[in-house]
Image (cartoon, helix red, strand yellow):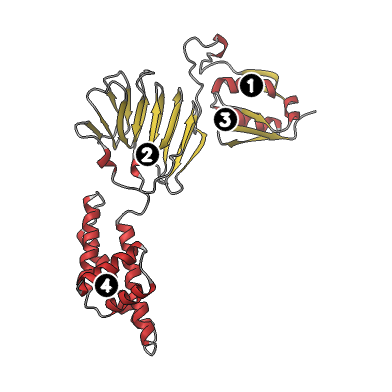
Amino acid sequence: MDTNERFIFLLQQFRDGNISIVEQDELFSLIASHEFDHLLEQQISRDIHNQEKTGADLPPHVSQEIIRNILSAEKMTAKIIPAKRSYKTWYWSAAAVLIMALVSYFFLSGNNNTARSFSEVIPVGTIAVNNSSDTTRTINLSDGSKITLQPQSTLHYPDQFSDSIREVYFEGQAFFEIAHNAKKPFLVYSNRIITKVLGTSFYIDTKTTNGNEEVSVRTGKVQVFENSKMQIKKQQAPSVIIIPNQRAIYEPAKRIFETTLVEKPHPIIREPGARPDLNVAENKNLIYEQERLQNIFRQLEEIYGIEIIIDNQDLNNCVFTGDLSDEDLFTKLKIICLTTGSSYEINNTKILVKGQGCN
């Protein structure tokens, strides 16, 4: 193996974390000689080129700036290390070059648990609809499902679904109304999560300001799990099941799901055949006259499908008088709590009411 091949071998060993102390000293010595700058530059350029092919397009001036910064690291380090410590000078200068090269490598190779770009997993031949307008756009699928795309959102779907499964690919924000078919599950693939249903309605948001992805359920039951195809580090994919007025928030940095309530819960829509007294209309009169809180909270639980826990049983003795018919759930709770000297908080998918209670 000639010296060029030896340098490339040592560089790869260092980058993979398999280099010995003796080999590391040898590599740092070669870097300090500046005889192999061209090979280091070629390797960095190759990493940049490979990353650009996978979708993370870096402008040429950015690529060149990265290379210049790495190759100038030794000169910059030499200025701040005392010249009398010559061995330490070249050793740590070379180390600085390698550290910067490694940082660049992991940055360029997308060391964020993302194995590939989302476009790579979308099947060839699907129909692509990009809503570039400033209004919503409705897409009707062959199975009777309907998807309402928000602006700047994209949907990929087949002309006809297979006999066993219904799959679409999505980026952005949209409301899904899925036709029920127990024999053909409906799967929505997004960049980091997969949403699986049989027939329901839900909202997906892959463009949150904090980088998370969210699924909120309007009707039915939804299973959400991590899109393992987009991960380099394989592990058992986390998943959650959510029901109406609940949402699942996927945090990619931690690879976990958080379940909580939607920002504005709606009266739930009961399935056909449900008990008549449970089919609560959204405009149902909620006028109370000296009504105990226990009864009011039980009624709100039935309307919204959300469990309300009373922290202090003495609160059950409190009474409320007022009209809550036209208020949303959280406004209803605020009015009740202000009237009775209590408070509430959201605990995952439940509501906890606290207070001293009444005699």
Distance of label 1 from label 4 (alpha carbons):
69 Å
Looking at the rendered structure, the secondary structure element under dot 1 is helix
First in sequence, mark 1 or 2: give its number. 2
Q: Which residue is mark 2?
A: 227
How crowded is the residue under tag 2: few (<14 C-alpha within 10 Å), some, or many (20+)? some
Residue 105, percent from left and from top? 31, 61
Q: Which residue is mark 1?
A: 298
Q: Position of residue 315 (x, y in %)?
A: 73, 29
Q: Earlier in the sequence, mark 4 or mark 2?
A: 4
- Foreground disc of the pair 1, 4: 4
Of labels 1 and 4, earlier in sequence is: 4
| Mark 4 crowdedness (10 Å alpha carbons): few <14, some 14-19, many ≥20 | many
Q: Nearer the viewer, residue 126 or 135?
A: 126
In the rendered image, residue 52, in percent from the top left (x then y), is placed at: 22, 53
Q: Amino acid at mark 2?
A: Asn
Mark 3: amino acid = Thr
Q: Residue furthest bottom?
A: 84
Nearer the observer: mark 4 or 3; the answer is: 4
* Marks 1,2: beta carbons within 8 A: no
Q: Quadrant of the N terminus?
A: bottom left
